[in-house]
Structure formats: C-alpha cells, structure tokens
Amino acid sequence: MSSFRMRKIVIDPITRLEGHGRIIAILDEKGDCIRAYLQVPELRGFEKFLEGRPAEDAPVITPRICGVCPTAHHMASTKALDDLFHVDPPIAAKKIRELAYNIFMLEDHALHFYVLAGPDFIVGPEAPKEERNIVGVLKKVGALGYKIVSVRRKFRKLNEKIMGKTIHPPFGRPGGISKPLEPEVVKELRESVNEAIEIAITTHKIFKSIVLGDPSIYKLVTSDVYRHETYYMGLVDDKNRLNFYDGKLRIIDPRGREYAKFDVHEYLNYIAEHIEPWTYIKFPYLKPIGWKGFVEGPDSGILCVAPLARLNVSDSMATPMAQQAFEEMYETLGEKPAHYTLAMHWARVVEIIYAAERIKELAEDPDIESREVLNIPTKTPGPTGIGVVEAPRGVLIHHYESDERGILRKANLLVATQFNAARINMSIDKAARALIKGGDVREGLLNMVEMAFRAYDPCHACGTHALPGELKIVVELYNERGELLGKKYLRD
C-alpha cells in the first residue's frame, strides 16, 4: 500500500463572481500544490428551454440566464432575430441599441472594478477578509466612492427609461426597438453624459495610482504567476478598432499576428466545442488547430476573450481619451499583445473610458430623436439567425434555427465565460502551484488564487449548458506525481 499522503484544499464557494464554482487544489506530502482546477457544479440548460418556442420569445427568455448581464443576452438574441427574420433595423434603432449597450457596459464594468475586483487592489490582496469587500473599498476611497455609486445608479435608471427595464428589458424587436426615445429622456441623457466621462477619468486615475504607485501591486500585475500566451478574439470595426455592438470577429495569435477575421456567420469554420467529464461548462476552442488540452502557445487551440483580448485584437480605439489610455497601457506593460491576466482590470478601465465617450457621441447624435425605430419583418423567417455582441466578459454568440413559422428548432449559445474557461483553469492551476508551498494555505494566499479567475469576471450562470443526466460528474484520484489512480462516477 502506498505511503504517500495527499491533501485536498477546496475553496467553496468562490466569491465575488456571477454564478457558482469551486476551486480544488491537490497538495503532495510536502504541502506543495501539484494540481488545481475550477469546477462549475451548477447547471442551466436554456438552449433546451428555447426549443419549440416562437423565436420572438428568445430575447425575453435568454436574459433570465443571468441577472448581471441580461442586456448582453437580450442584445445578442435581438440581433439573431434580425438575421432570422431577414430584416435590417432603421439607423435610429441601431444607434439607440448601441447607446443603451454602452451604458450597460459602463455600469457593468464599474460594478466589477469597484465591487468584485476592487477589494483585491484597493484594499489589498492579503488584507483581512472582513475588509476585502465593498465596505472596505468605500472606506479607502471615501466620498468619491459614494459619488461613483450615485452616477452608476443614475445611468442604470436612464437605461430603464430607454429599454423599459434594466434586468429583463422588453426593448429589442426583430427589425428595431419597441419604442422611440422620449424628448425628456434625450434631454436628461445629454445633461448627464459629462458625469459618465468624469467617472471614467477618475476611475482611470485611481487604477493608475494603485498599480503604478505601489511597486508590489505592479509586480503582481506583471508577474509570471498570472501570465499565459494564448490566442485572443474580439469584435472590431472596419478599421480594426474595438466595438461592443457590431463588426467582425478578429483572432490574433500569441505573437499578435492576425490569424483570422470573419463575419459571425462563418464562426463554425473557426470554433468548435470540447466537453470535460468533471464540469458542466464547455470549452470552445480554435477548430483549425484542434483541442490540445490545457496548454498555451501557438500550437494550442485555446482562445481568450474579455477586455484584454478586445484590446489585444484592436489596432486602436475609436475615441480620443480611450486611445490615449490604450497607448499608455501597452507602453507601460511593454508588450502587445499583453499576456498578463491581471492586466484585464487595466483593459476594463480603458473600456470604461471608451464606453463613456461613445455614450456622449451617441447621445448628441440627432438620429436618436427619430421616431422611425422599427422595420416590421415581412419575409418568411429562418432557417438560421446568428447574432453577436461583446458582453462585458467577451464575445457572446446566439445561434438559432427555426422552421418557416419562426418556431425554434435549435439554439446554441456561445458565452464569453465558456471561451475563457480553459484559460481560467490554466490560470488557477498556475497560481495555485506557484503560491501554495510547504502546506502554507493561509487565507490571503487562497484569495490570490481566486484573483486568477476574478480577472476574467466570469459568469458561470451563463456558461453552463449541458442537460441533467447527459453529463456525469466524476471524482478522480491522483498520486503525488499527478498520476491518475482511479475514478468514480457520482451518478452511476
């Protein structure tokens, strides 16, 4: 009988993210971590809910996947219906959709920066856990914190007036939107946009002060512990600039060279899906390269989406202050593409600036005052409709198939957290192996392992799609050399 003793550390539940998950770290007899991974034990299955439903129900049903990013699902679904019903929305509807979407991106990114990730940076990664929360952040930043909360709340209220609701909006329709903007909403929007710009600039200053003003934090951001060289994917406009609402998907390789650029209708030529038996999340990968496991480098098919990926695939930003912040970030990091996982937070702040500037541009555009916001579909729907947007966490694709009556026969949702799932697992494994040594598993170190996933802002509620009974959760037993000794299926 073997004399080795293994020890398992389970972080459950992991905190400050959307959805549920747990980190399992396996330690050898010396107390060093030899393997760690993220398991997502929850299940949704919304694709099955959609089958047999009228296609028009999809933008109403899919926002229920998640209470944090319903607008992303609503918008991707609405764009898929434009495609399914073969109808092009009026220019005013497109601009109002993009306006609402940028407001959503602004407030969602602010939520992550200050509430979910902020405690790690603003309060400190190894600060007592009683202080690593939004209350600790507010104590650190003082009255400014309350101002940020107030402005974010104001823009959520504005989006409620534009979209009807912020959580489950009855806003998008195939061919446009449900109602034009009322004059008083336009007036309030134009009077408020400078507050969004001010908050974006302030957030950028806070981040730079924390990261560049504290050598220990900057060292953490640029540490090899949080670094992977993978492919990146994101939406770009016709000048290869970042765009949250529309454009083509661009993929670059780990050296920054363009690997592919394509319309979303061609995504099946580039993306395939892999399933592992120990988690409900699926792992999309680069189809031409193939699934090579949890490895990085040019021969790996692992993709990354999310804010850093969007900036990595973009040649520049479409707004002036965001462009300045974009250049400053890459100049400071000294590489493009940037492979540092914690630089996701920096990229997110650059995107907050872009969102604020884009809100101002669209709010001042006279087209948004038009009453022509809907082209009623007249063609027979189907057989396929595909829509894509950039969710706060990365590329989101809704793919529907229907009959000639518009009844959905099949739906597939490719969600940002799925695209990032392989890299997230690699990040957790690398951080745990580097940080957990000699049996030292104090709470601050475990939080630094959690920081490896928190940078991606994952949403596991959005990312799980297998049906109950089709996928068995398996328990595997390894020895101290990481060799598999046996496995047991929990549902046999």
Image (cartoon, rainbow, N blue to C red):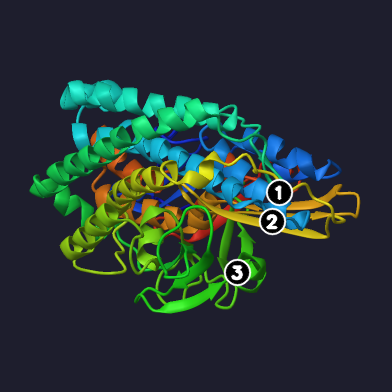
**Residue located at (9% from left, 45% from top):** 214
Q: For residue 263, which numbered disc appears in the image?
A: 3
Residues 209 and 30: in front is: 209
**Residue located at (38% from left, 66% from top):** 314
Judge left or right: residue 91 versus residue 159: right
Instruction: Judge whether 315 appears above or below 422 on screen.
Output: below
Where is residue 22? Give x, y as percent: 47, 39
Query: The disc labelled 1 sits on which kind of residue?
Result: Gly
- According to the picture, the residue beneath numbered tag 2 turns out to be 88
**Residue located at (15% from left, 53% from top):** 219
Where is residue 307? Give x, y as percent: 39, 53
Residues 104 and 164: in front is: 164
Judge left or right: residue 38 versus residue 343: right
Disc 3 packing (10 Å; few <14; some 14–19; many ≥20): few
Of mark 2 and mark 1, the one earlier in the sequence is 2
- According to the picture, the residue beneath numbered tag 1 turns out to be 175
Q: What element carries label 3?
A: loop
Report how far apart the C-alphas of labels 2 and 1 lie in the structure.
6 Å
Report how far apart the C-alphas of labels 3 and 2 lie in the structure.
16 Å
Quadrant containing the C terminus in the rendered view: top right
Query: The disc labelled 3 sits on which kind of residue?
Result: Asp
Where is residue 460? Give x, y as percent: 54, 41
Report how far apart the C-alphas of labels 3 and 1 lie in the structure.
20 Å
Query: The disc labelled 2 sits on which kind of residue?
Result: Asp
In terms of image quadrants, where is residue 133? top left
Q: Is mark 2 on a helix, strand or loop?
A: loop
User: Disc 2 vs disc 1: Cβ atoms closer than 8 Å?
Assistant: yes
> Is there any visible trace of residue 63 in the rendered image?
yes
Disc 1 packing (10 Å; few <14; some 14–19; many ≥20): many
Judged by depth in the image, the label closer to the viewer, 3 or 1, is 1
